[in-house]
Amino acid sequence: MNYEFFLAKRIIGSKAYKSSVSAPIIKIGIAAIAIGIVVMMIAIATGIGLQQKIRDKVVAFNGHVTISNFDSNNSQESIVPISKNQEFYPEFKEVDGIKHVQAVATKFGIIRTETDFEGAVFKGVGQDFDWSYFQEFLIEGKLPSFTKKWSEEVLISQYLADRLGFKVGEKFQMVFAKNDTEKAPNIITFNIVGIYNSGFQELDQQYLIGNIRHIQRINNWEEDQIGNFEVLFPIIHNSIKKESKFIKTHHLRSTLSR
C-alpha cells in the first residue's frame, strides 16, 4: 500500500474527520479531484482518437510514405515520371510491416460547366489502388472500376459536387494543360459514379479520383510510367520507425528505375 492511499484511508476512516466541520469540504474536494481525473482521461482519449482520424484522412489521399523522383518539385502535380518496374513493387519485402504499395499520378485541371468552373487535382490510380479508406468516405453511388484499359468513371467530393451542382450519373468536362503551352489543352469528359465526403474540406475541395491512364496519355508517358508510389502501413502507431527505416533505405537517386 503506497503512502498517499494509506493517508487518505486513515483520514476518511477516522471518526474525528466524520464529525469535523471540514468533512463536507474534504468530500467535495475528493469528488472534484475524481471528476477532474475522469474528464482529463476522456479528453486524452478523445484527442488521441481525433488525431488518429485526421491522420487516416490524410493517408487516404497521400499514403503514409510517398516515393517520387528525386528531381520532382514539391507541387501536387506529377512532373517527372518514374517506372513501375521497381524491386519493391508490387510487394515490398525488405521492410517488415508494409501493408500495400500503390502507383499513382496527379495532374491539375479545370472542371468546366456551362455556367461555372473550378480548379481541382485529378488523382490517377490503377487496379492496385487500396479503396478501403474511400469506401468509408463514400456517401452516394459506387467506387470507380478500372478493369477496362480506358475508363471515364470518377469519384468526386461532395464539396465539388455541391459547388458545381453535380449528381451521380452526370458527366462533365475537365481541361488539362499540356507540357507544351503552345499546344491546345486536353479536354476529357468524365462520368461521376460516386460522391465521397472525408470530412476534411481542405482535401475534399482539391481531389477527384480517376483512371491513371488519362494522365499517362496527356503527359505522353509509357504505360509503365507513373507519378509516384504511395506506401501504406497497417498499424499507424508503429509506423514512424518503419517510415524512418524505409526512407533511409530508399532515399537515393539510384533507387528508382526510370
Image (spheres, rainbow, N blue to C red):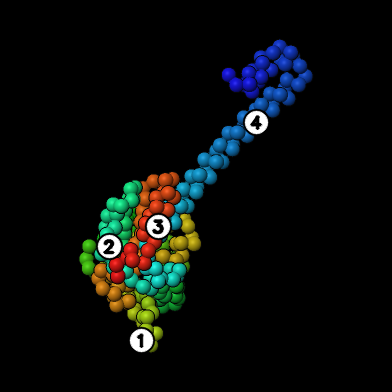
The residue pinned by badge 4 equals: 33
Q: CA distance from mark 3 to mark 2?
A: 16 Å
Residue in front for this viewpoint, 4 or 39: 4
Instruction: Give the farthest residue toward the top.
Output: 15
Helix or strand or loop: what does disc 1 sit on? loop
Q: Nearer the viewer, residue 69 or 43?
A: 69
Q: Earlier in the sequence, mark 3 or mark 1?
A: 1
Rendered position, 185 above or below 38: below
> Where does label 1 land, which residue?
183
Please name the amino acid that badge 1 sits on. Lys
The label nearer to you, 3 versus 1, is 3
Position of the C terminus by quadrant: bottom left
Label 4 crowd (10 A; few <14 / some 14-19 / many >=20) = few
Q: Earlier in the sequence, mark 4 or mark 1?
A: 4
- Give, as a three-letter code, the residue at label 3: Ile
Disc 3 vs disc 4: which is toward the camera? 3
Whether 147 is drawn above or below 171: the answer is: above
The amino acid on which the numbered mark 4 sits, given as a three-letter code, is Ile
Residue 54 is left or right of residue 172, and the answer is right
Q: Which residue is mark 3?
A: 247
Q: Nearer the viewer, mark 1 or mark 2?
A: 2
